[in-house]
Image: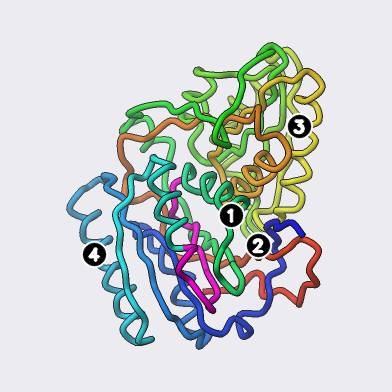
Amino acid sequence: MTSAISSVPPPISTLGEATWLGVNSFERRCVGSLEYLARSGVALRGVHLLEYPTRGFPEVIDRQLRRAHRDLVKASTHAANAQFETATVEAYASAQFEDYFSTLAETLGSTALIIDISCMTKIHVVALSTALATLEINATQTLLAYTSPRSYGNLNRSSSEIGWSDVLIAPIGTTARMRNESNSRGVIIAGHESERLWAALNEVEPASGLLALGSTPGRPDITRLSEKVNRRVISHMTLATEAPWSRRVVDIADVALMRQLVRTEIAEAAKHEAPLILYPFGPKTLIYAAGEALLRGYPNDSWFVYPVPAGYHVSYSEGIGQTYWFSTAPADMAREPSLLPTAT
């Protein structure tokens, strides 16, 4: 049986003991899933909090917010009488994250593993999709948690003011080929930073592909904002390129549709043995599903392009919206009713 992410996880009440893995951030939503677990009475055996040595601006507020969120995690751990561990990993280095995760995966035992991807860098989300597809996870079951913010700040302004320190072009798997580029395909998962997308397209611009915009249930304003900030990109990709790109709006919980759309792009790229390039800038649930589909369906010709920000503004997002849960159980396993979405 093969595993695949699904938005229909087993009920939280069936988890038994659980180990939680997440990333500390200035964003309040970094602790959303942990707070939900505490309210749901889930017994935590271990809590693993990753720290990124990234810079937030203003730096004083960044440090204050991260310290406050770290203290919240420690308090939850203490209340649950669980083991607490922190580790610092480079935010844009896949190998260090993969090494940490593979070590953790070997030591879990009879506990569920809950991975909060809310504040992971998108590079680490892609790396996680690779790791979960290839590693033996020593856990009773594995769930992903994603907490949406209540609102986003002006990410485009932050991007243009802070800028980029580098642009990474790397294979989805361990290696990949870059041939027949004139027939290359792209999967753009657009977010709220058109500046980042333009920077990526300036490095590599495929001939055609898919442009996906994420939608949040009950929050049409977030989708409209993404469409507004990316209107020049959308116009360019649909009118000014050699072959028009298809444009789809995808619910952030509809990982099955995202995988299906990526498989369609894989089939088109495979006709010419051409590269397929992922632009991972939107909702991390869709990025994970896309990375998983590319690794399973087109591992030798799949790439991603990622401009690395020089820093972040602490107004990146505000508050906690909803927490969504996703199972990575075998794809043909019977599902129980979903808790999705759960207000936090």
Q: Earlier in the sequence, mark 2 or mark 1?
A: 1
| Residue at screen point 76% across, 32% down | 265
How crowded is the residue under tag 3: few (<14 C-alpha within 10 Å), some, or many (20+)? many
Quarter of the image that includes the N terminus: bottom right
- Residue picked out by circle 3: 265
Residue 57, percent from left and from top: 25, 45
Circles 3 and 1, Cβ within 8 Å, touching? The answer is: no
- Residue picked out by circle 4: 67
Name the foreground residue: 262 vs 321: 262
Residue 195, percent from left and from top: 46, 29
Q: Please state which amino acid type lies under the numbered disc 1.
A: Leu
- Residue picked out by circle 1: 132
- Tag of residue 328: 2
Q: Please state which amino acid type lies under the numbered disc 3.
A: Glu
User: How far, Cα to Cα, is label 2 from label 3?
Assistant: 23 Å
How crowded is the residue under tag 2: few (<14 C-alpha within 10 Å), some, or many (20+)? some
Magenta range: 105-121
User: How far, Cα to Cα, is label 2 from label 1?
Assistant: 8 Å
Q: Earlier in the sequence, mark 4 or mark 3?
A: 4
